[in-house]
Image (cartoon, helix red, strand yellow):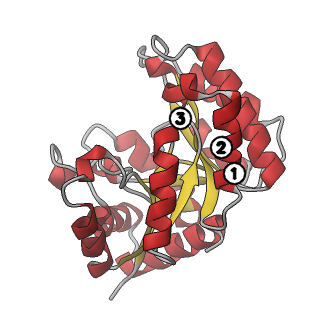
Amino acid sequence: MITFIDSHAHLNDDAFNEDREQIINSCFEVGVKQIIEIACETNEWKPAAQLCEKYKGQIYAAAAIHPINAEQFTDSSFEELKQYLTADNFKAVGEIGLDYFYEDSSPRALQQEIFEKQLDLAQDIKKPIILHCRKGKDVQDYSAYEDMFFALKKYNLSGGILHCFSGRKEDAFRALDMGFYLGINGIIGYKKNDDVRQIIKQVGLKYLMLETDCPYLPPQSKRGQRNSPVNIPEIAQNLADILGKSINEVADITTQNAKAFYNI
């Protein structure tokens, strides 16, 4: 059986409350042998640790405060975050970044402040970062990417991934120039995303990781349904078709990339 890693999932989301264990076991059965659980709210850190303990060697975690949750950042929550990130099962700081689509509820200045504090932490503890970047409501407003890359220049980081890549060609290659990966999920099959598909062709498989971002962003065939790591093989096939590669090669290289990045 071909095996995969889902490098970015939210299995503690309420969408899985009724069948979380069943879904996780189904993932393993279709070849998704390891999953990175992303805990980006304060109330998700403990459940992520519990998933790692229950599924040792199969589920690992990352923890942080998401930009749209920037108001959760306090001195005490920051200290708690540092404690979780010292555990061996917590492999990265994330997802962190800038989301200007939601600036009405999470102001840009606050997002930028919390982003840099978490970059400081990632640098101090020498763990890689998982980046979230979303442009403003104006479709031409890419200032979130500009501000993100400006901030990143100040740090000596232990690697990074620009998750759910949906930016411009220059954003992709600026990330690659920093030694970062791009996270590829179900959106690569969406009809409107031909620009993203063309960028992926230029980037190549060497710099990509598979992810679902579940329960969000299911692949095209599952639009309107809850996403889960069970869909990783379909995303892998979509990527293989775009790149003209075999699904075996996509699985092998993206798995190698994820294992190296997350140190698993």
Neighbour class for label 3 at 10 Å: few (<14), some, many (≥20)? many
Locate residue 246, reporting x and y percent: 37, 77
Question: Which residue in the protein does label 2 denote?
Answer: 80
Evaluate if marks 2 and 1 touch, with contact meaning CB atoms under 8 Å apart: yes
Neighbour class for label 1 at 10 Å: few (<14), some, many (≥20)? few
Question: Which residue in the protein does label 3 denote?
Answer: 66
Quarter occupied by residue 113: top right
Q: Nearer the viewer, residue 50 or 199?
A: 50
- In the rendered structure, which disc, 2 or 3, sits on the residue that comes first in sequence? 3
Callout 2, which amino acid?
Answer: Glu
Residue 83 has which mark? 1
Q: In this view, does 184 lie to the left or right of 85?
A: left
Q: Residue at x 51, y 17 (%)?
A: 106
Residue at mark 2 to residue at mark 3: CA–CA distance: 15 Å
Is residue 189 at all visible to an observer of this figure?
A: yes
Q: Looking at the picture, does residue 165 appear above or below residue 4?
A: above
Residue at mark 2 to residue at mark 1: CA–CA distance: 5 Å
Q: Looking at the picture, does residue 251 appear above or below residue 222?
A: below
Q: Is residue 194 left or right of residue 42?
A: left
The extreme front residue here reads: 76
Callout 3, which amino acid?
Answer: His
Q: Residue at x 65, y 27 (%)?
A: 74
